[in-house]
Amino acid sequence: MADNNTDDDDTDGLRRELANLRAVLAERRDDMIAAASRATEAVVTPVRENPGAVGSAFVLGGILGLLVGLALGQSEERSRHWYDRYR
C-alpha cells in the first residue's frame, strides 16, 4: 500500500511540475510575441514614412547584386556549356 501512495505523490508532483512548465512557456511565448511586434513596428514605421527612399534602396541593392553576380560569373574561364563541368 505504501508504494501506491508514493506513486500517487510522484504523479501529483509531475503534474504540478508540468503545469509550472506550461505557465513558464506561455509567459515566454507572450514575451516573444511582444518583442516581435515591437521589432516589426520599428521597421514598418520608417517604411511607411519614406516609401521612396526604401524603394530606391531596394533598387540600388538589386543593381549591386546583379553586378556582383555578373562579376563572379565572368571571373573564371570556363566552357560555355554548364554541363562540361560535370564530365
Image (cartoon, rainbow, N blue to C red):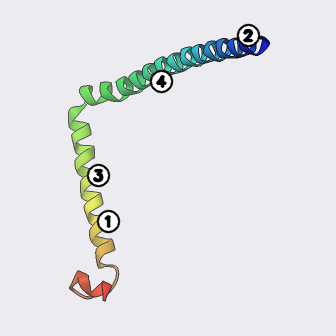
Mark 3 = which residue? 61
**In the drawing, does residue 59 fall left or right of residue 32?**
left
Q: What is the x, y in percent for residue 30?
A: 47, 17
Q: Residue at x 25, y 30 (%)?
A: 50
**In the drawing, does residue 33 fall left or right of residue 20?**
left
Quadrant of residue 4 within the rendered picture: top right
Label 3 neighbourhood size at 10 Å, few (<14), some (14-19), many (20+)? Answer: few
Say what amino acid the circle numbered 3 marks. Gly
Mark 1 = which residue? 68
> Which callout, 3 or 1, points at the residue further toward the start of the chain?
3
Mark 1 touches mark 4? (CB < 8 Å)? no
Say what amino acid the circle numbered 4 marks. Met
Q: Residue at x 26, y 88 (%)?
A: 79
Mark 4 = which residue? 32
Q: Is residue 57 above or below residue 23?
A: below
Q: CA distance from mark 1 to mark 4?
A: 37 Å
Say what amino acid the circle numbered 1 marks. Val
Q: Which is in the foreground here, disc 1 or disc 4?
A: 4
Residue farthest right in this picture: 2
Mark 2 = which residue? 5
Mark 2 touches mark 4? (CB < 8 Å)? no
